[in-house]
Amino acid sequence: QVQLVESGGGLVQPGESLRLSCAVSGITFPLYTMAWYRQAPDKQREWVADITGGGKTNYTDSMEGRFTISRDNAKNMVYLQMNTLKPDDTGVYSCNAHRIFALGSRWDYWGQGTQVTVSS
């Protein structure tokens, strides 16, 4: 059974930081690219960042420089360090594991999400 369990969300003031964690089980973790998505109130879910099993990272332009994604393949964990948070960063942050195969098929697994609220 595949499980992705996020933690670390909460209520913070603008300018503060949070570190989200995602604990993964049930997959061969290093074979999966891990990603963070977020969904703001009344908006579609958007991709935030991802990291390959080998550690290559990609970010949404608006978040690069403030957010850092990392992973620990020994612990089956992925993290999202979020600095200088803004009210627009408010939303539910979800962890995603995906693997793309040679013929184009893709396996995706999702966590339940963790709420991040940035407000003064």
Image (cartoon, helix red, strand yellow):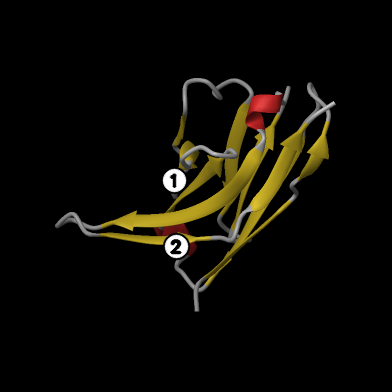
* Residue at screen point 18% across, 54% down: 104
Q: Quadrant of residue 12?
A: top right
Q: Is residue 61 left or right of residue 71?
A: left
Residue 54 — which label? 1
Residue 48 drawn at (x, y percent): 51, 36
Q: Secondary structure at mark 2?
A: strand
List the residue tagged with mark 2.
Answer: 109
- Amino acid carrying label 2: it is Tyr
Q: Quadrant of residue 39?
A: top right
State the quadrant of the C terminus: top right
The one of 119 and 68 positioned closer to us in this rendering = 119
- Amino acid carrying label 1: it is Gly
* Residue at screen point 55% across, 52% down: 95
Q: Residues within 10 Å of mark 1 (few under 14, many from 20)?
A: few
Q: Earlier in the sequence, mark 1 or mark 2?
A: 1
**Residue extending furthest toward the bottom:** 1
Tell me if residue 69 comes above or below residue 107 in the rendering: above
Q: CA distance from mark 1 to mark 2?
A: 19 Å
Look at discs 1 and 2 and give the one toward the viewer. 2
Q: Is residue 107 left or right of residue 113?
A: left
Residue 10 drawn at (x, y percent): 79, 45
